Amino acid sequence: MVKKIVTDSPRDEVFGNLVEKFDMVCIAAKCGNECSQCKHCHYALEQMSALAQGEKTSGLCPKLETCVFNCLTEDVSKVLSCVATRCNVHCYDGDCPSCKMISRRIFSTICKQHSMTTQPQIKYEGNERSLEKN
């Protein structure tokens, strides 16, 4: 799925298309050991667990947490698609630095694994070191 997004999306849609598919539950399930060793990822797991159990969260990411809570209460069977379409944006709007850090690490990894900087539609003129700093 990621490769298809990277190779088929126009330059101005790649990041948004990847964000829509960002699934912290999947990341936590497939990368549990790595996630537990990262304070940002571990925090995200704790917040997801608290929200899923109806418990109060720390409130460090108020817009994101409220949005996820609303998705859970509206229709639990559609929570993942709801979070993807309505809540993931709060990871990048300044509401949640932890989420932004996790996303940056994941996006950098995706970029390297799929040679995004060499994709013709990307037209990237920098280098990987400058990409990692952003």
Image: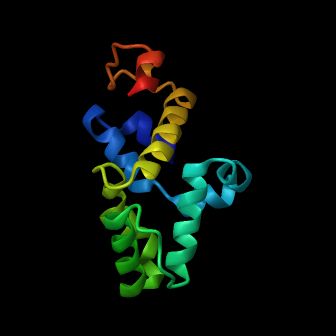
* Horizontal and vertical percent position of residue 121: 32, 25
Find residue 119 and report its horizontal and vertical position in percent.
41, 23
Front residue of 94/70: it is 94
The residue that appears at 47% across and 17% down in the rendered structure is 129
Report if residue 3 is visible in the image.
no
Farthest right residue? 33
Q: Picture coordinates of residue 42 (x, y %)?
A: 61, 57
Residue at 37% over, 14% down: 126
Residue at 70% across, 56% down: 32
Q: Is residue 91 visible?
A: yes
12 versus 42 height, above or below = above
* Residue 118 drawn above or below residue 85: above
Query: What kind of colouring is applied to the model shown?
Result: rainbow
Identify the image quadrant of the C terminus: top left
Residue drawn at 66 percent across, 61 percent down: 29
Q: Is residue 121 above or below residue 54?
A: above
Q: Is residue 50 above or below residue 62?
A: below
Counting the numbered discs, the total is: 0
Where residue 84 sits: x, y (%)?
Answer: 39, 62
The answer to which of 71 and 98 lies nearer the viewer is 98
The image quadrant of residue 13 is top left
80 or 66, which lies in front?
A: 66
